[in-house]
Image (tube, rainbow, N blue to C red):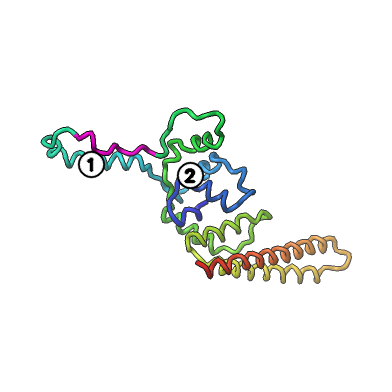
Amino acid sequence: MLALLAKEPAHGYQLRARLRAALGPLGGDLNAGQVYVTLGRLEKAGLVSRADPASKAVSASKAGSASKAGSASTAGPVSAADPAPKADPLSKAGPLSKADPASAERSADRTDRDRKTYALTPAGQRRVAEWVGEVSWPRPDLAEFHLKLVAVAASRLADPVAVIDAQRRELLRRLRDAQRAVLAEPDDSMAALLLEGIVLRLQADLRWLQACEKTWVPRGRNA
């Protein structure tokens, strides 16, 4: 989630939308609560900070009113033709129809906490840079590496193809080590079966990286 803030600050519901877009069906079960819990933990860790745009607008309004106090007393009442302030697009718009679940979900997102804009702190920026450079292969769920490619491309933190190349070199190293370990095992070794499984998994992961490269090379050329 930190990497998704590298491009620009965002509201919690915007981050959830980005995650859903990047993960497709895998992100379908992601709810707002998970996003805000994670953001809260990141904030406590000093990796993100938040600001309330509404509070800033109020402060700016008060400052403007104070600076114009003298002229306002002689200028007379505000004309009725002056444009009224625009309503906050995230404010509550009254009761929703029960027949509109999509509107109900949007309304649930538009709470006070959604108005908080989250941004990376300097520590968060450093952590994202470290994460981009990591080549430790992710858990069986490959979504983390996929999100890394999406995030670095969106924020221009790195070339996705270069990230793929670095990961491929690490997997090839691990594959060579595993193959040597298989050859070193005696014929009746029970561990040989496990090592063979590791070899097959690494080979499959390398084929997936090749598919990733075929996808991201054209995208990089069109960027």
**Percent position (x, y) of residue 220?**
53, 68
Circle nearer the N terminus (1, 2):
2
* Residue 201, position as x, y percentages in the image: 74, 62
**Label 2, residues with CA under 10 Å away: few <14, some 14-19, many ≥20:** many
Magenta-drawn segment: 78-88
Near-viewer residue (215 or 26): 215
Residue drawn at (61%, 45%), measured in percent from left and top? Answer: 28
Q: Determine the residue positioned at 56% across, 34% down.
A: 101
Residue 146 is drawn in which quadrant?
bottom right
The amino acid on which the numbered mark 2 sits, given as a three-letter code, is: Gly
Q: Write down the quadrant of residue 55 in the picture.
A: top left
Q: Which residue is mark 2?
A: 12
What kind of secondary structure does the magenta stretch mostly adopt?
loop
Would you say 60 lies left or right of 131 here?
left
- Please tell me whether mark 2 sits on a helix, a strand or a loop: helix
Q: Is residue 48 left or right of residue 102?
A: left
Write the residue at 69% across / 63% down: 205
- Disc 1 marks a residue whose amino acid type is Ala
Q: Residue at x 47, y 60 (%)?
A: 155
| Picture mark count | 2
Kindly state the secondary structure of the residue where label 1 is placed. helix
Asked if residue 4 is positioned above or below residue 187 in the image, the reply reads above
Estimate the x, y position of residue 148 in percent, counting from the top left.
Answer: 56, 59
Using the image, tell me which numbered label, if any, was put on residue 63: 1
The quarter holding residue 116 reads: top left
Q: Residue at the front extreme?
A: 81
Q: Nearer the viewer, residue 188 or 216?
A: 216
Q: Residue furthest left?
A: 74
Q: Is residue 26 magenta?
A: no
